[in-house]
Amino acid sequence: MADANGTISENLVARRSDHTTIRYTAAGPADGPVMVLIHGWACDRRDFHAVTGHLPEHYRVLAVDLAEHGESRSTREVWTMEEFARDVAAVLEAESVTEAVVAGHSLGAAVAVETGRLLPGTVSHVVALDGLHYLSLFPAQNEEQTDAVLGMFRGDFAAAVRGLVEGGSPAGTDPAVMDAYFEKMVAVRQPAGLRAIEGLLRWDMDAALRETKQPITVFAIRDLVTQEAIDRYGDRLDIVLVDLGSHHFQVEAPEATARLLADVEHPERL
């Protein structure tokens, strides 16, 4: 575990039966308020290492590698957002957590919502880091739309990943930064990478939101949000517009991201 100074301990393990081993890191005192950090698709918990270092020292911070991302491994057949939430739940059980704020980036935001649904008595607040507001994904697409998107990934995976990176990069984003994200994401382990995209496409966010009782705060990059999305979800999501870089702003602006996360239960500060 983390030492008294909050040093991150690597390679902590939560096992889910015989098919899934989840790796995660922990920092901060064991009795501190818990913040769970969930990476996005084709990323890993290292995206949050710098953020963790900027969070208040009294926090207990758990950063999770979802199955087949980072150092976590799985031979399972199910790759839904609900199943990823069970990965997170396994970590919370391993850490004997009774209350936590759960924050997820991109696909991880969907996983955070599902974790809240799965553990309504444990998760006190759900936070999305540039997630949940993309109308190209939500509301749930029909079969024809889903098959069309999956066809792009199956036909030319690298080109589809490049499109995701470009779509999440506002004008002026450093091309070298975009290239770095692309190289990382295109190397996602298969077949889990493609199956996870399919799971996100088939996720019914509207249904999930109806059943999620916790408050949900979305920190969204201003240049990537449409007014239509705000109009559609503004009565269910507390959407806070930020100017911190690209879709991966937690990597580019970790100190500012940490401030947002630390203030999430104090909306007057946002």
Image (spheres, rainbow, N blue to C red):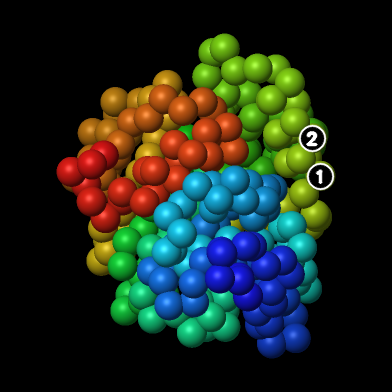
Residue furthest top as drawn: 172
Residue lying at 36% horizontally and 58% vertically, measured from the top left? 126
Label 2 neighbour load within 10 Å: few <14, some 14-19, many 20+:
few
Query: Which quadrant is the N terminus positioned in?
Result: bottom right
Find residue 183 and name its label: 2
| Residue 12 x, y percent position in the rendering | 69, 74
Classify 233 as above or below 62.
above
Q: Is residue 162 left or right of residue 126?
A: right
Residue 165 appears in view? yes
Residue 133 appears in view? no
Classify 9 as above or below 169.
below
Q: Is residue 113 left or right of residue 155?
A: left
According to the picture, the residue beneath numbered tag 1 turns out to be 187
Query: What's the distance in space between the residues labelled 2 and 1, CA to CA?
Result: 7 Å
**Label 1: which secondary element:** loop
Name the amino acid, label 2.
Glu
| Residue 53 x, y percent position in the rendering | 55, 50
Classify 85 as above or below 249.
below
Name the amino acid, label 1.
Ala
Q: Is residue 72 left or right of residue 240?
A: right
| Residue 46 x, y percent position in the rendering | 67, 51
